[in-house]
Structure formats: structure tokens, C-alpha cells
Image: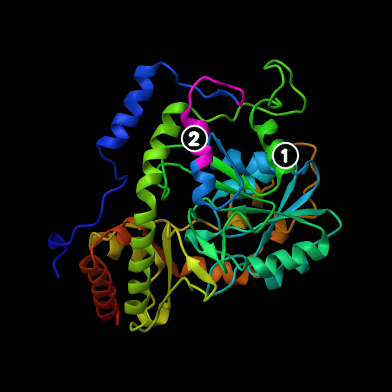
């Protein structure tokens, strides 16, 4: 196949319904949501209800972005200065920075070599008397081994915040992600599977925690109380009506997109299984649905003529295949490795910084990161011909280099 004959889906996908929804809000002059008992606009409140229904959860609170969603969840769970929070080492910077932003200490957990997700077998070795929570990350939308993680958390009395930034609609063993732990956080940033350019949300089944989340999100206020009464420390993390209107129309389209993502990903998994030296992110039997935000693929260097991942990206991009850069492991980032974080916080017991940031302490992610590439989510919204083309290109790269 010739790349000029292959068309990959563009992102974001929008239509007149999206434009009309935003236009309606602009023309109404109601650009913010107001308070629970005094709605200025209706879009945020309706999105909260609709997103909760979609995620099969009791409470959902929209907020400014996915990073803030994590910070809100941590504050609502009373995690603060000096507390330790275990996070996956392969995730976007925000999973670690959100912990540091409230004065807590992120502790990095190596990943499983096949799922590329937090490896539960590493967890207990990282737990100390300072540990307060675990943040598993559903990388690429693929659900973590949440039943095992929850057993460990319950054994040690730890809170669990699921980072679902990639995982809208993902489901594991009968439960949607975000409902296994105390709460789950989502992102609606421009590249995410459900987007309004920016935005985030926190979901929970717990009534009391839901109230605390709202207080942190809306300047310490309480529903039913005077607008200028503030009862706890919080901030203004409210989402605007324009973003919420766009999210509502995008959410209507998403269930069909989610079906297509799962169908196309399963097809590509089957095709790549026939190609020696290529191993995409493992989808365990417990995974019933995957948001499939990105698609991490491990390649065996020896099978591809000793190629480095930078050259692999170069070859894929030359062929016109949409790719995403893989996240650098958190322990390799300057802000963590060189401990350029908050003053007056003791980071000396963290498993990063100085000698503790040595690659030998994170063997799996060090190997996976050096031998992986990621396909962009748009490939799964494209025709099967485009997926066949990806396999064909990888076969050609392999032959070319061997």
C-alpha cells in the first residue's frame, strides 16, 4: 500500500451540533455555572449528571483540568505534607507533580513488562508508615489490575485514587474505572478521547467524599450555605459553561467511538501477533472495555537490526503513521531526579533523587521505554485498511534493517 492512499482520522472530531451548543451558551450570556442551589448556567450541572451516568458512578464533579482533578482528590482525602503516595513510574508528569504540589512525596512504582501498568507485586515493598495512598494509572486507557491493588490497599489502610485521564469508558471485571478506588480522576485536555480542549472531572461512589471534593473544588463552600461562607481550604477549580456544553455534545458521540476503538484495537492486536519481535500492550482477560487513548508497542531491538526507538519513530513518521511520544519515566525527570520541588519537604526517603534515581532500581520501565513507540488514538477511528498499512510498514522496516 502507498501512504497517499491511506487516510487516518483527524482529531478532534466535531460537527454542527458541537458548534451550536457552544453558540447557544455564548448567546445566552450565562458563561459560568453558579452554585448548586443557584445555577447561573445549566451545562456544568447537566454534564456532571451525564458523565456520572456514563461512568456508572454516583457522583461526578467537572473541574478545570485533569491535573487539578488529581490535586482535588488528594486534598479531599486529607493527604498532605510529608505523606507518601505511590504512583506508576510510567505516566505523564502530572501524576507525580500533583502529589508534590500539596507537599506530599510521590513514590515511583515500576511497571509490569507486558501490561506497562503499575506492577502490584512491587507495591508492598514501597509501603512505609508514611504511605497514605496509591495512584494507579490506566495508561492508554488499559485498566490496571484493580482487584489486586485494592486488596493491598485495604490490607494497609491506604486510599486509592485512580488516574483515568486516558480511560473514559474503560471497564475491568464488571466495574468501570474510577469506581474501584475511593475516587477516579479524568482529563478532557485537547488530545484526550473525550475533549473540550481542556477540563477534568473527579468521580466517586462515596457521599461524604463527594461533598469534600466539591468543597475543595469550589473555594471551600458547602451546598445550601451562603455563597461567601467558606468552611475548608479550597480553590476555584470550576469548569466553565462553554467547555461543559462542548463536553456534553462530545459525550453523546463517544459511546460509538469507544466501540470502534475496542474493535479496531483487537484487530490490530491480532495482526501484530503475527509479526515476530513486536509486542503491544497486553489486554488482560479482565478488561471488558478500553478507552484506547494511545497504543504502546514494545519492539525487540535484535529483531529490528538494533534500531533505537528514535529511529523507529523516524521510520513510522516517514510512512505517515500518527504516533505519540512515549512519556519519559518519572524518575528520569529533572524536577524529581534533582529534587527541584517544594521547600521544607523531606524527600530523603523517596525512591528517586541522587543514587535512588539509578536505572537499576527501575529495570522494567528502563527497558520498555527504550524499546517502545506509541500509536496515536486516531488510528483506531480509521478504517481497517489503515491498520493493515501499519502492520505492512512495520514488516517493511524489519526487512529493511535486517
From the viewer's perspective, is 372 left or right of 234?
Answer: left
Q: Residue at x 57, y 48 (%)?
A: 93
Residue linked to disc 1 = 75
**What's drawn in magenta, residue-wise?**
36-49
Task: Answer above or below: position of 152 versus 100.
Answer: below
- N-terminal label among 1 and 2: 2
Relative vertical location of residue 242 with respect to residue 319 in this rendering, above or below: above
Q: CA distance from mark 1 to mark 2?
A: 25 Å
Q: Is residue 289 magenta?
A: no
Name the side, left or right, on which 364 lies relative to 84: left
Q: Quadrant of the N terminus?
A: bottom left
Q: Is residue 306 above or below residue 94?
A: below
- Tell me which colouring the rendered structure shows: rainbow
User: Front-most of 300 and 242?
Assistant: 242
Please give left or right for residue 181 compared with residue 270 in the image.
Answer: right
Q: Which residue is mark 2?
A: 46
Residue 223 lies, in percent from the top left, at: 68, 27
> Element at badge 1?
helix
Q: Can residue 216 be seen in this snapshot? A: yes
Amino acid at each position: 500500500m502507498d501512504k497517499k492512499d491511506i487516510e487516518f482520522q483527524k482529531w478532534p472530531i466535531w460537527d454542527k451540533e458541537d458548534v451550536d451548543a457552544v453558540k447557544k451558551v455564548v448567546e445566552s450570556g450565562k458563561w459560568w455555572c453558579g452554585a448548586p442551589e443557584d445555577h447561573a448556567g445549566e451545562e456544568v450541572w447537566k454534564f456532571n449528571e451525564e458523565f456520572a451516568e456514563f461512568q456508572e458512578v454516583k457522583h461526578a464533579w467537572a473541574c478545570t483540568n485533569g491535573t487539578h482533578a488529581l490535586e482535588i482528590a488528594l486534598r479531599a482525602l486529607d493527604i498532605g505534607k510529608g505523606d507518601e503516595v505511590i504512583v506508576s513510574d510510567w505516566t505523564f508528569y502530572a501524576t507525580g507533580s500533583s502529589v508534590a504540589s500539596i507537599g506530599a512525596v510521590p513514590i515511583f512504582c515500576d511497571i509490569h513488562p507486558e501490561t506497562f501498568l503499575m506492577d502490584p507485586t512491587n507495591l508492598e515493598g514501597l509501603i512505609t508508615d508514611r504511605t497514605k495512598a496509591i495512584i494507579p494509572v490506566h495508561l492508554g486507557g488499559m485498566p490496571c489490575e484493580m482487584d489486586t491493588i485494592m486488596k493491598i490497599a485495604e490490607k494497609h489502610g491506604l486510599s486509592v485514587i485512580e488516574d483515568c485521564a486516558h480511560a473514559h469508558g474503560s471497564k475491568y471485571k464488571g466495574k468501570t474505572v474510577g469506581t474501584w478506588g475511593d475516587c477516579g480522576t479524568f482529563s478532557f485536555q485537547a488530545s484526550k478521547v473525550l475533549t473540550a480542549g481542556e477540563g477534568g472531572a473527579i468521580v466517586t461512589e462515596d457521599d461524604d467524599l463527594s461533598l469534600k471534593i466539591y468543597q475543595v473544588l469550589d473555594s471551600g463552600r458547602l451546598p445550601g450555605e451562603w455563597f461567601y461562607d467558606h468552611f475548608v481550604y479550597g480553590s476555584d477549580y470550576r469548569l466553565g459553561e462553554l467547555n461543559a456544553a462542548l463536553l456534553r455534545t462530545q459525550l453523546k458521540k463517544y459511546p460509538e467511538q469507544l466501540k470502534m476503538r475496542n474493535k479496531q484495537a483487537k484487530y490490530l492486536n491480532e495482526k501484530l501477533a503475527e509479526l515476530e519481535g513486536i509486542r503491544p500492550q497486553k489486554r488482560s482477560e479482565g478488561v471488558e472495555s478500553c478507552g484506547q487513548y494511545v497504543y504502546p508497542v514494545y519492539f525487540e531491538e535484535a529483531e529490528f537490526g538494533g534500531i533505537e526507538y528514535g529511529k523507529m519513530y523516524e521510520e513510522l513518521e516517514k510512512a505517515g503513521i500518527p504516533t505519540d511520544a512515549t512519556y519519559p519515566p518519572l524518575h528520569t525527570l529533572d524536577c524529581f531526579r534533582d529534587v527541584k520541588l517544594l521547600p521544607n519537604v523531606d524527600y530523603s526517603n523517596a525512591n528517586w533523587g541522587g543514587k535512588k534515581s539509578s536505572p537499576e532500581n527501575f529495570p522494567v520501565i528502563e527497558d520498555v521505554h527504550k524499546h517502545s513507540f506509541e500509536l496515536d488514538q486516531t488510528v483506531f477511528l480509521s478504517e481497517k485498511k489503515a491498520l493493515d498499512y501499519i502492520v505492512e510498514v512495520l514488516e517493511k522496516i524489519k526487512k529493511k534493517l535486517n
